[in-house]
Amino acid sequence: MQHQKPFPESKRTRFKVWERAGADSAPHPADQHVGRQIAVVRVQSDVSQAQLARSIGISFQQLQKYENARNRVSASMLYEIGRSLDVPVSRFFEGLPGNETSRETSPLPVDERIDFIASAEGRRLIEGLMHLPPRVRGRMAAVIAALGEELAGPDAYRDTKATEEAVPADCKAV
């Protein structure tokens, strides 16, 4: 039986080891960052998950897993994603702690739309919308935008209260 020589202490401390407790542990922060950046660039490029997935030859479910860091993105897949979105691969690592190229680099702004899209509620909404015909989807988008504008106005609370009072009792949701 051969015994392996342990690493000298100096070599062992040179590298930071990431310990993973098991399959159910949280994704690595770098995988989360890269996945979030894929989603940010995709949304900024006005490309849907289905469109990007199709262009790189994977299912949109697989792309969702990349964006949510449930699956790691290989280097070749990251290259294909960057090529499809017309950005360099380095774009997905911008803002990653320890990856700064200069002191002038500022972290990327967090886009709350990405967090919503990645949430269970956002995925449910998108899945429901995808079942609608394209024309109806467009109309729903217009209704949602109009609601957002209405609620963002200065008298939103007062208007909402007045609307609730104006609805007959037999038409109110229970």
Image (tube, rainbow, N blue to C red):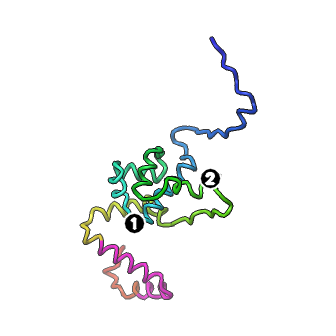
Q: Quadrant of the C terminus?
A: bottom left
Could you tell me what secondary structure mostly forms the magenta stretch? helix
Magenta residues?
138-162
Point out residue 148 in the picture as x, y percentages from the top left corner: 43, 78
- Amino acid tagged 1: Asp
Tag 1 secondary structure: loop
Q: Report the disc number at residue 46.
A: 1
Dividing the image into 4 quarters, which one contains the N terminus? top right
Front residue of 8 and 100 = 100
Which residue sits at x=58%, y=38%? 21
Query: How far apart in space, not on screen, are marks 2 and 1 (Cα)?
Result: 27 Å
The amino acid marked with disc number 2 is Asn
* Quarter of the rendering containing residue 142: bottom left
In magenta stretch: residue 120:
no
Provide residue 13's location: percent of width, then percent of height: 72, 36
**Crowd tier of the residue under label 2, counting other residues whose Cα lies within 10 Å: few below 14, some 14–19, many 20 or above:** few
Number of callouts? 2
Residue under label 2: 99
